[in-house]
Amino acid sequence: MNTRDKNTFHEGAPSEPAFDATEWDQQERGRRAARQGGDDGLDARARDYRVVARAVRSRPRREPPMDFAAAVARQAADREAGIERLLSRWLAVALVIVLGIVGVRYGAAVWTAFQQALGDAATGWVLLGLACAGLSWACARIQTFTAQARTARPAA
C-alpha cells in the first residue's frame, strides 16, 4: 500500500487558496441573476459575475456543418483555379503572338536550315508527324469540351 501523497509539490510552491464562501455566494448570485434577467439587490462583484455568466450562456451552441472544411477548401480551390485559368489563357495568347512574330521574322531561315539538315524526304515525314500530333491534341480538347458540356447540362 502506498502511503505517500501523490499530490505533493516542491517546497517553494504556493499552497492552494482557501475556500471563500462569500466569493462563492457572489458567483452563484450573479449566475442566478443572469438566468433570471434581473440585477435587483446585487452588489458590484455579483454584477460582474452576472456579466460573465451571461457571456458564457450566450456563446454559440451549434457546431459548424459536417462539410465545413471541405466547403471552404472547395471555395479556395475554385477561386485559385479561376485565377490560374485566366492567367493560363493570357499566357497562351502571349505565346501565340510571340510565336507568330518569331515565325514571320525567322521562319524562312529556320525552314531552310531544317530542310538542309534533314533532307526533303525526312522533312515531309516530320511535318506529317507534327500534323498528326496537332490533330490528336485538337480531338482530345474537343472531346473534353463536349464531356464538360454534357455534365454541365445533363439531358432531360
Image: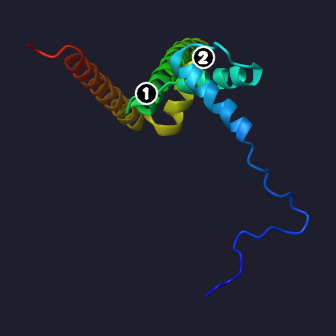
**Residue topped by disc 2:** 102
**Residue topped by disc 1:** 62
Q: Furthest residue to the left? A: 156
Q: Nearer the viewer, mark 2 or mark 1?
A: 1
- In the figure, is residue 38 to the left or right of 8? left
- In the figure, is residue 114 to the left or right of 132? right
Image label count? 2
Q: Secondary structure beneath disc 2?
A: helix
- In the figure, is residue 144 to the left or right of 34? left
Q: Is residue 72 above or below residue 101?
A: below
Q: Residue at x 86, y 57 (%)?
A: 14
Residue 107's x, y, as percent? 55, 18
Residue 73's x, y, as percent? 47, 30
Q: Is residue 40 above or below residue 50?
A: above
Q: Earlier in the sequence, mark 2 or mark 1?
A: 1
Q: Nearer the viewer, residue 117 or 79?
A: 79
Q: Furthest residue to the right? A: 12
Which image quarter holds the C terminus?
top left
Q: Nearer the viewer, residue 82 or 126?
A: 82
Q: CA distance from mark 2 to mark 1?
A: 62 Å
Q: Residue at x 91, y 64 (%)?
A: 12
Q: Nearer the viewer, residue 117 or 155?
A: 155
Q: Secondary structure beneath disc 1?
A: loop
